[in-house]
Amino acid sequence: MKIALISDSLLLDRTLEMYLKEYLTSYKFCDFVVATQPVDSQKPVFLIGEYENANLNKPFTKEVLLDKLRAFYGQIQRREESKEEEEIKQANVASVNWEQMLSDLEFQNQEKKDDSLREKIREVLERYAREIEGIILEHLKESYANQ
């Protein structure tokens, strides 16, 4: 968890620096911003203060602050994971060779039709084989009977 700090209060700034010293970094390298006033940012903003959309109201303890920050960071990570999963899904859909898949399906359907035709041919050949066998047996009986 890497945090950049934007504060309009010197006292609150020093307190946050003390509480968050192991997490602080520059804006460029941060995961999110902790701000004491509403700010426009390309990074997620954890807002502290008496604002309608504040993530944490004053006063607060170090433990409460850290708990809320961890929860906020967890939400950011889950959103990023969901976003990455969605991008992967989109990439997978885009990379599918639909023409090849359709061709494969058509080939499978044709194979099923071919299998049906093969089965019909096999049945006809078996019927003729039995008929020929019967004719041969009958011929052999007549041949032995005439001897």
Image: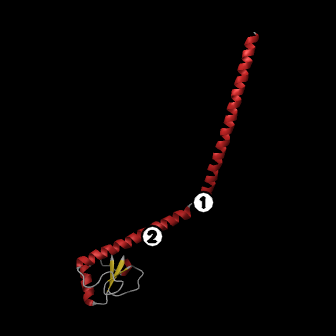
- Residue type, numbered disc 1: Trp
Residue depicted at x 45% and y 68%: 84
Farthest-out residue, right = 146
Image coordinates of residue 127 in percent, x first then y, are 69, 31
Is 81 placed above or below 130 here?
below
Disc assigned to residue 98: 1
Image coordinates of residue 113 in percent, x first then y, are 66, 46
Q: Quarter of the image for the N terminus: give it.
A: bottom left
- Residue type, numbered disc 2: Lys
Residue depicted at x 38% and y 73%: 76
Image-based side of 113 in relation to 60, left or right = right
Asked which secondary structure carries label 2, the reply is helix
Q: Quadrant of residue 35?
A: bottom left
Residue depicted at x 70% and y 34%: 124
Asked which secondary structure carries label 1, the reply is helix
Nearer-the-camera pick, 123 or 8: 123
Farthest-out residue, bottom = 9
Circle 2 residues within 10 Å: few <14, some 14–19, many ≥20: few
3D distance between C-alphas at marks 2 and 1: 24 Å
- For marks 2 and 1, the one nearer the N-term is 2
Which residue carries the number 2 mark? Answer: 83
Image-based side of 119 in relation to 7, left or right = right
Is 52 placed above or below 109 here?
below
Can I make out residue 133 in this image? yes
Q: Quadrant of residue 130?
A: top right
Image coordinates of residue 41 in percent, x first then y, are 41, 83
Image coordinates of residue 79 in percent, x first then y, are 41, 71
